[in-house]
Image (cartoon, grey):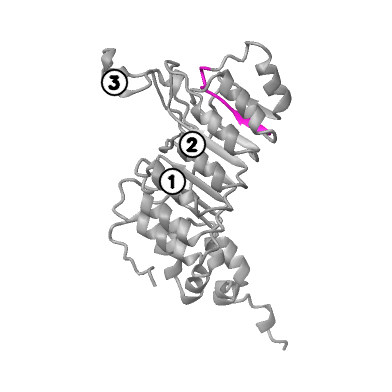
């Protein structure tokens, strides 16, 4: 009689793939879909193979720390420094938010001179001098995106003078009703960032004169976003027509803020003194439909338990 063993289905063990036999490159691609917190606090602890992959500098060319949990007791600044150290100087793109400090930026600038892209969002602990000192050591920087982060005219000049390859610059502020006209930012950009292709100045107080300076000083611009720049009068003369003709993608001051890439904030005054001298109350607010369109594109955060250990330092 013929044996029936050939027709028996394979066992469960034979059906289960051995993940450890997956090619190193493929496993690395999968793990790179996790954020830094998940890699350092979880993934690298699974097995020695994953730990080896997670310590590969190639895993840390991009560090995204946006949407980090502000209520977590986990020290995100220390964790980010460790991720930077693991990159061994190969870091090219880093995205940080509220927990970033001057000290962290200094750490990045010292150990990541190949950095090409830097994004800072809601970094109220970063001073303008801390940012300008850091960019002096980042000559390869091509993209600098700032959302609600302190910066002044002198800092813009320093950035332009020390980052000759800068192609994309975003300086996005809380916009206010136009009480004060100020072209300092625009003039600094026009005089120091001639290679820009992409410029976003959300809520800036520049006038037509500042915009004209940008068009003249940044001849390679392909994208220009001046939404909520309410001191601009593009109906006067041919400035509006010139923008449309010169720029491939031009966002007007009154264009919708949908898909702008961040949470839009607004207040009706230019400074605190102006705000309260007019009788403003903290209880006053604006219509959400008028001023707020939450279209926050950042992603990748996760919650870290205070019970998790810190054995990712070695």
Q: How many neighbours does mark 3 have within 10 angstroms: few (below 14), some (14-19), or many (20 or more)?
A: few
- Quarter of image, res 221: top right
Q: Which label was assigned to residue 296?
A: 2
Residue, x 49% and y 70% (percent of image)?
55
| Quarter in which the N terminus is drawn | bottom right
Can residue 39 be seen here? The reply is no
Q: How many neighbours does mark 1 have within 10 angstroms: few (below 14), some (14-19), or many (20 or more)?
A: many
The one nearer the camera, 279 or 191, is: 191
Question: Residue 152: percent from the left, percent from the top?
Answer: 44, 35
Question: Residue 170: percent from the left, percent from the top?
Answer: 54, 37
Mark nearer the viewer, 2 or 3: 3
Residue, x 46% and y 60% (percent of image)?
110
Residue, x 66% and y 83% (percent of image)?
5
Q: Callout 2: helix, strand or loop?
A: loop
**Residue that carries the numbered disc 3 in the rendered image:** 273
* Residue 233, above or below 168: above
* Residue 137, above or below 238: below
**Is disc 2 in contact with disc 1, using a CB cutoff of under 8 Å?**
no
Residue, x 33% and y 45% (percent of image)?
70
Magenta segment: 222-231
The one nearer the camera, 220 or 31, is: 220
Q: How many neighbours does mark 2 have within 10 angstroms: few (below 14), some (14-19), or many (20 or more)?
A: some
The one nearer the camera, 187 or 25, is: 187
Question: Residue 19: percent from the left, percent from the top?
Answer: 56, 71
**In terms of sequence position, does the residue under pointer 2 or pointer 1 come before the other?**
1
**Residue that carries the numbered disc 1 in the rendered image:** 131
């Amino acid at each position: 009689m013929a044996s029936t063993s050939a027709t028996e289905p394979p066992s469960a063990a034979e059906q289960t793939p051995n993940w450890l036999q997956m090619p190193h490159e493929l496993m690395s691609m999968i793990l790179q879909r996790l954020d830094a917190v998940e890699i350092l606090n979880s993934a690298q602890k699974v097995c020695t193979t994953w730990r080896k992959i997670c310590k590969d500098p190639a895993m840390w060319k991009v560090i995204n720390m946006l949407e980090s949990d502000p209520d977590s007791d986990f020290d995100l600044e220390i964790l980010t420094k460790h991720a930077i150290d693991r990159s061994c100087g190969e870091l090219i793109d880093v995205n940080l938010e509220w927990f970033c400090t001057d000290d962290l930026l200094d750490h990045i600038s010292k150990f990541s001179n190949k950095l090409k892209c830097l994004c800072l969002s809601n970094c109220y602990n970063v001073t303008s001098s801390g940012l300008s000192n850091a960019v002096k050591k980042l000559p390869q920087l091509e993209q600098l995106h700032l959302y609600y982060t302190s910066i002044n005219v002198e800092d813009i000049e320093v950035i332009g003078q020390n980052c000759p390859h800068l192609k994309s610059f975003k300086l996005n502020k809380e916009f206010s009703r136009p009480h004060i006209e100020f072209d300092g930012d625009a003039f600094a950009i026009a005089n120091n960032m001639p290679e820009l292709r992409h410029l976003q100045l959300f809520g800036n107080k520049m006038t037509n004169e500042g915009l004209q300076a940008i068009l003249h000083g940044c001849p390679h611009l392909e994208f220009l976003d001046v939404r909520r720049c309410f001191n601009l009068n593009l109906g006067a003369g041919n400035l509006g027509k010139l923008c449309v003709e010169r720029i491939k993608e031009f966002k007007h001051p009154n264009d919708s803020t949908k898909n702008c890439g961040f949470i839009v904030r607004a207040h009706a005054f230019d400074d605190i003194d102006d705000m309260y001298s007019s009788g403003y109350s903290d209880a006053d607010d604006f219509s959400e439909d008028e001023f707020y369109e939450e279209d926050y594109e950042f992603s990748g955060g996760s919650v870290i338990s205070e019970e998790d250990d810190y054995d990712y330092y070695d």
